[in-house]
Image (cartoon, grey):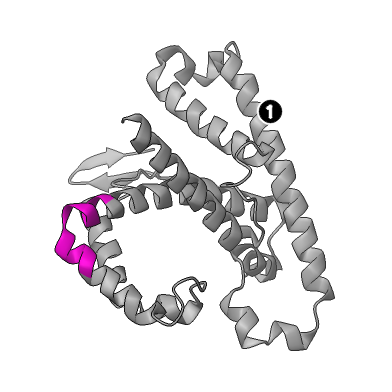
Amino acid sequence: MQGKDINIYRYITLYSLDVICESSMGVSINAQEIEDSEYVKNVKLLCKIVAERQNRLRERFDLIYWLFPNYYREKRAVRQIHNFTYSVIDSRRKLLDESSPQQENDPEIKKRVAFLDMLLQSTVDGRPLTREEIREEVDTFMFEGHDTTGSAMSFALFLLASHPDVQNQALEEQKCMFADDILRPATYDDLQNMKYLECVIKETLRLYPSVPFFARKTDKEVEFKGISLMG
């Protein structure tokens, strides 16, 4: 990547981090304006450490990983991120406890409910999720979401630039929707009506899937074509 490309990708990644944080936790970390905030720095550091461990054979083994500086950097970053997430969980739980039944049934509020709020109100086998279980879900959503969103947006921009006819149609759709005021924020209903842009995004994900494969471990032995598999 050249310098300009790196800056564009950094902006997209920070924008994605803002979007995912807002949708998952219902708070803004202003990643684009405050790039040196502790949360943003820790997220970027952990992503960097994960990439480095994949390329450093000695650091891959958990048994000796504690011998390397990245182990302690990772522990410190994880602790700070968990503390931030716990503080948001506690404040959102308090806010939900203090909200009135009228507010909870407001259709506009239900439309923009954060992922965290849904977790706080969810149950598993009749019991509410624990504080740690909620934190794990939010952290997973944050880390998996911001990087994959940034990747999808980057490839979408690349494909739009490579296909001017498609770009023009996507632009015309936006012009029709925002002709009266191009500076107004997009609403939930606007997003539902962006049918052509939705097709662009889906085709982008088909061509360049953010997560092309994933692995699973079985907790019991499985037999496949006469072969016993475990793990």
Residue 106 lies, in percent from the top left, at 67, 87
Residue 125 visible, this angle: no
Q: Image quarter for residue 75?
A: top right
Q: Residue at x 43, y 82 (%)?
A: 180
Horizontal relation, residue 9 to residue 102: left or right: left
**For numbered disc 1, what is the local secondary structure?**
helix
Is residue 91 or residue 132 the one in the foreground?
Answer: 91
Q: Residue at x 28, y 56 (%)?
A: 205
Instruction: From the viewer's side, name the closer residue of 136 and 1.
Output: 1
Label 1 Cα neighbours within 10 Å, binned few <14 / some 14-19 / many ≥20? few
**Quarter assignment of residue 10:** top left
In the displayed structure, 45 sits above or below 57; it is below
In the rendering, at what x and y percent does residue 217 appear?
A: 40, 42
Relative horizontal placement of residue 162, taking residue 170 as reference (left or right)? left
Residue at 60 percent across and 60 percent down: it is: 22
Residue 35 within the segment the image draws in magenta: no
The answer to whether residue 136 of the structure is visible from this angle is yes
Amino acid residing under circle 1: Arg
Nearest to the observer: residue 190 or residue 226 = 190
Q: Quadrant of the C terminus?
A: top left
Residue drawn at x 51%, y 26% is 49
**Extent of the magenta region:** 158-168
User: What secondary structure do most residues of the magenta stretch adopt?
Assistant: helix
- The residue pinned by badge 1 equals 76
Residue 140: give x, y in percent of width and height.
54, 49
Q: How many marks?
A: 1
Which of the pair 4/193 is nearer the observer? 4
Query: Percent position (x, y) of residue 65?
Result: 55, 16
Examine the structure image and report whether residue 165 is included in the region drawn in magenta.
yes
